[in-house]
Image (cartoon, helix red, strand yellow):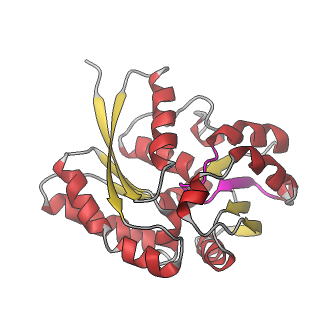
Amino acid sequence: MTRTYRIGQIVPSSNTTMETEIPAMLRLRETIRPQRFTFHSSRMRMKKVVKEELAAMDAESDRCALELSDARVDVLGYACLVAIMAMGHGYHRVSQARLTQRTAENGGQAPVLTSAGALVDALRVIGAKRVIVVAPYMKPLTELVVDYIRHEGYEVIDYRALEIPDNLDVGRHDPARLPDIVKSMPFEQADAIVLSACVQMPSLPAVAKVEAMTGKPVVTAAIATTYAMLRELDLEPIVPGAGALLSGAY
């Protein structure tokens, strides 16, 4: 019998991309593997990507973990990278442990991962030490993200802050613009490219093009989160057309 897994997502209220890109990847996986997936979300209020709104939003994540554990999901993904990274170094570990505890207290224990933790772990999986980063945030928040990645042991040799303050506008950013942005960066000196350090900025359609153009592995927050979810479910982390991390090479 084919097993169906329930994927829970803790999502900013203005996010429109996480619930498209992660299901898109897992639907692609369904074409080559027998497992099936359903998708379930709970939302935390957030409209402007600024530190105050992010902190207020993060406080709602406990409620979301409880709601999703009511549905007895198999894994939960916290779908806002900058909200975690803006809370201080290493906060993804604190958040994951606390939210997993909430699911256990509700009698529906399931692992909780964050897109922030998934991204820094993904860079370790592919053996990257030196990276370039593209992010949609205003410069001060982008610098917080870069500092967080550096604190996890990576050298960020260059980054681009696209400075889009409204989260709905982040979701409208055209991924076809990403290859030219990467072209303007010293990608030759990097081990890997973080094409979207944000699960709201669409990037999946550009991943194969940027890998072909640069010859470097490309990771995004959404790809890293999908990889982490599959690993938590003890499933082979392979998705056709979703970049090096999900190619089956790791």
Q: What stretch is highlighted in magenta?
A: 190-203
Image location of residue 166, percent across then percent down = 57, 66
Quadrant in which the C terminus is drawn: top right
Image location of residue 61, percent across then percent down = 32, 66
Q: Is the magenta stretch mostly helix, strand or loop?
A: loop
Image location of residue 50, percent across then percent down = 53, 76
**Nearer-the-camera pick, 77 or 126:** 77
Image location of residue 34, percent across then percent down = 39, 21
Q: Is residue 152 above or below residue 232?
A: below
Q: Residue 215: which quarter of the image?
A: top right
Instruction: Residue 144: say if magenta.
Output: no
Outermost top residue: 1
Left or right: where does residue 124 sit relative to residue 90?
Answer: right
Quadrant in which the N terminus is drawn: top left
Task: Identify which residue is drawn at 51% across, 63% down.
Answer: 81
Task: Identify which residue is drawn at 49% across, 41% down.
Answer: 20
